[in-house]
Image: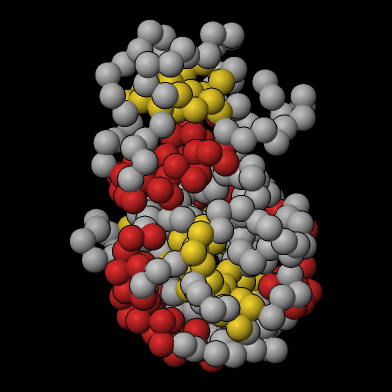
Amino acid sequence: MTIRQSKHLSSPGSTPQQYHTRENCVNAEKPMNHIDQAANALRKGELVIFPTETVYGLGANALSAAAVRQVYSVKGRPASSPLIIHCPDLSAVRRWCGEWPESAQRLAEKFWPGPLTLVLPKKADIVDEATSGLGTVGVRVPSHPVALEFLRKAGVPVAAPSANPFTRLSPTRVEHVREVFGARVRWILDGGPSAVGIESTVISLVGPRPRLLRPGMVSLRQLEEVIGPIDLQMLAQEEPHASPGLHKAHYQPRTPVVLYQRGKEMPARGRGISLLLTNSVPGESRLMPNDPMEYARELYAVLHELDVKKFDWIAIELPPETAEWEGILDRLTKAAAPNRTDHDVR
């Protein structure tokens, strides 16, 4: 295998990020245009891990049932959990949607490219494997420049969940995906650390009223300012699910997570560490940012870092219950939900 470097790209207001691809193949010494070759491989049915502003995604050609089935196999993901389709621009998204209501247009104009997924009726070209057999599809336009270039060159809709084993921590750095999938996925595009750090907000525009399926860093309040009242659905009520991220337990490190409320007793058994927003408490601790955007950007990377240190638990101080923190609180609640076997818990 080899690592090759290419030009620099950066998102507005960010420092330039170097990116490269890694091709896990025997004959990897010939010159190549990295994104061109990764895009070509995806069109032919191979998987490609690529960066987005939220987390790294495990991408497949959404027009190929065989390619999409590979995603579910590699992740260990149940068929009841649909994938999100990524496109390079609004016109590409509309090509794959059976309907495009005014509310979708307003949200797209306000929040795309960016961390918002819209669930809409799909066209038949998107394979049923990508949507768990549903007649709807989640679509979004990411804002990461490497993702956008890759999607443009791919020329097909890319079905991509987070590039992690099902229910585990999502990756926000290329090293997170290399550790888990480096031997199984041939193409890995490195776009540096994710700028947002948690998965996209998901809203369904199917039915009489919009429904928030998964909170994120685009808040419910921001959405309602654009399209009016939105109903809430925070956990799956049906099979297959209307959106990814609707399981009670999700986004989990291998180390058990305990949510801590200031003034309550800390976990006492074993060796642990606390992630705090305020002043320290007795024992080993780490201070997290008080700004929700900075907190989200750091959260998964910190949990990945701590997960290899073999703590018995990670206690995380609960953030404020405000609109800006709702996506983070959702991830913390699911990270702390019981979903383990004795083998999983250290």
x, y percent for residue 149: 43, 76
- Residue for point 76% across, 57% down: 78
* Closer-to-camera residue (60/89): 89
Q: In the rendered view, tell whether residue 266 sits above or below residue 13.
A: above
* Closer-to-camera residue (49/160): 160
In this rendering, would 46 be left or right of 216? Answer: right
* Closer-to-camera residue (133/87): 133
Q: In the rendered view, tell whether residue 279 sits above or below residue 152.
A: above
In the image, farthest residue toward the left? 13
- Residue for point 54% across, 8% down: 268
In this rendering, would 229 be left or right of 204? Answer: left
Q: In the rendered view, tell whether residue 172 sits above or below residue 213.
A: above
In this rendering, would 241 be left or right of 101? Answer: right
x, y percent for residue 54: 44, 57
Tell me, yes or no, if residue 270 can be seen here.
yes
x, y percent for residue 297: 36, 46
* Closer-to-camera residue (59/114): 114
- Residue for point 43% across, 81% down: 104
Quadrant of the drawing holding the N terminus: bottom right
Quadrant of the drawing holding the C terminus: top right
Q: Quadrant of residue 207?
A: bottom right
x, y percent for residue 80: 75, 62
- Residue for point 77% across, 24% down: 342
